[in-house]
Amino acid sequence: MRNAILLLGATALMCLGNARAEPTPPWRIAVDVGHHWRAPGAISARGRSELSFNQILADQLVLALEAHGMRVQLINRDGEMESLPARPRSAPDADLFVSIHHDSVEERELLPWTWEGRPQTYNDQWQGHSLFVSRRNPLPEASLLCASTMGALLQREGFTPTDKNARRRPWADQANTVHWYDNLVVLHQARQPAVLVEAGVIKNRDEELLLADPERQARMADALATGIAACLQVLHPPGAPTTEAGPPP
């Protein structure tokens, strides 16, 4: 499977010029805002919730995807959707499901500091993005293809990946920083290819500031959208019928 994905990935990267320059078919992309108000995810080095970072980057990704001519369904923008299975179920007809997150580090690796008079924790050792796919998804090869293409685009546009998550999650594509995370609900219960993006480590004090920068958010979103367009050009070439996904396992 890996050799086939690498070959398809090379084909997808060859499509990048078209993905940037030409209108794309009206593919349907589901963009999921990770976490919710009652469990807002990691807390950044300066005390911001991961959910707030996820919401802003998801908004930028919606704009970038729409600029490529794709139709977008934004899931959980208000942070009220607690059910993880409900998220992929709400977008059964999407061509790709993308869940937006920001990374943390293990509790034992955190160090104390004070920001604006409040005690916080940080870790400046780790920084960078990573991507995840599930072998329990009904279309794992397509999921990996899209994750690899998105990861390749991020690196091509100057974003730095991290190998932090290789300590717990096996590599699916080390060159493009994609890991297997088979039991992630939003990935394995999706009916279509599904990718989870960890945009960076918000416990890193320097990277937190970068991740909060609107210009950088827009650049990252454009890289992700361009990678998605290149992947879908390979999965759904003009004139080819769309393959229906089976029910989730």
Image: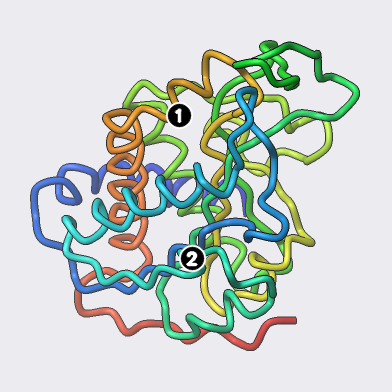
View extreme (right): residue: 108
Q: Which residue is mark 2?
A: 78
Kind of residue at disc 1:
Leu
Kind of residue at disc 2:
Asp
Indicate the quadrant containing the N terminus: top left, top right, bottom left or bottom right. bottom right
User: Where is residue 208 shown, x and y percent of the image?
Assistant: 53, 24
View extreme (left): residue: 22
Circle number at residue 220? none
Left or right, 96 with respect to 126, comes to: left
Residue at 86% across, 29% down: 107
Indicate the quadrant containing the C terminus: top left, top right, bottom left or bottom right. bottom right
Name the mark nearer the viewer: 1 or 2. 2
Q: Quadrant of residue 219?
A: top left
Residue at 28% across, 38% down: 218
Dot 1 or dot 2, earlier in sequence = 2
Q: Is residue 130 above or below residue 11?
A: above
Which of the pair 129/78 is nearer the observer? 78
Which of the pair 100/14 is nearer the observer? 100
Disc 1 secondary structure class: helix
Dot 1, how many residues are within 10 Å of its Cα: few (below 14), some (14-19), or many (20+)? many
Q: Which residue is mark 1?
A: 211
Q: Is residue 162 above or below residue 170?
A: above
Left or right, 173 with respect to 238, comes to: right
User: Where is residue 103 shown, x and y percent of the image?
Assistant: 64, 36
User: Where is residue 25 shown, x and y percent of the image?
Assistant: 19, 71
Which of the pair 58/17 is nearer the observer? 58
Residue at 84% across, 19% down: 109
Dot 2, how many residues are within 10 Å of its Cα: few (below 14), some (14-19), or many (20+)? few
User: Where is residue 200 shown, x and y percent of the image?
Assistant: 55, 31
